[in-house]
Image: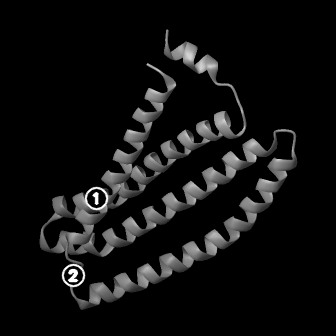
Amino acid sequence: MTTTHLLLIALLFSLAAMLYAVVLFLKIKRVPKGNAQVEAISGYIREGAMAFLKREYTILATFVAVLFVVIGISPIGWPTAVAFLLGALLSGLAGYIGMRGAIAANSRTATSANDYGMNKALDIAFSGGAVMGMAVVGLGLTGLIIVYLLGKYAFGFGFEPINDVINT
């Protein structure tokens, strides 16, 4: 099996994880939010969560930008800085997707517990958490693939020992 085959397999698993996150999110969105009072509270939660993310990501962007430059000019260099930046961006995206999944699940979990019982509520709650988990897995694996390809083709790193391990 060649490195190209392994990269394609990894990409398929990455896409499968992200697709599963979308399926779970859509499953959550099909469940009723509840009455008007629950919807209003859910709106406040959504507004607060998005304000939190905006504030967090504003501060984080400054930190990432400074660290990107520090890593780039350090002896470990720009390839590592680019990998760091990509990881930070994908991590932020996974956090955003996870927050959206949690927001979508919160009122629906409460309504499901009230209307359908604990099993349905737990299903919705776990699905909300799994959206984040699958986003982390899918985006993390995609990031590794991109870093490998950038290292090999943009920065000229040799990864031949990996081929030796794969072929043994």
State the SS at label 2: loop
For disc 1, the marked residue is 24
Tag 2: amino acid: Gly
Residue 160: image quadrant is top right
Relative to 35, is 14 on the left or the right?
Answer: right
Q: Residue at x 51, y 25 (%)?
A: 3
In terms of sequence position, does the residue under pointer 2 or pointer 1 come before the other?
Answer: 1
Q: Residues within 10 Å of mark 1 (few under 14, many from 20)?
A: many
Q: Position of residue 123 (x, y in %)?
A: 23, 58
Q: Is residue 145 above or below residue 106?
A: above
| Res. 34 mark | 2
Q: Nearer the viewer, residue 110 or 161?
A: 161
The residue positioned farthest toward the left in the image shown: 116
Q: Residue at x 72, y 59 (%)?
A: 64
Q: Residue at x 55, y 72 (%)?
A: 53
Tag 1: amino acid: Leu
| Res. 108 mark | none
The residue positioned farthest toward the front in the image shown: 153
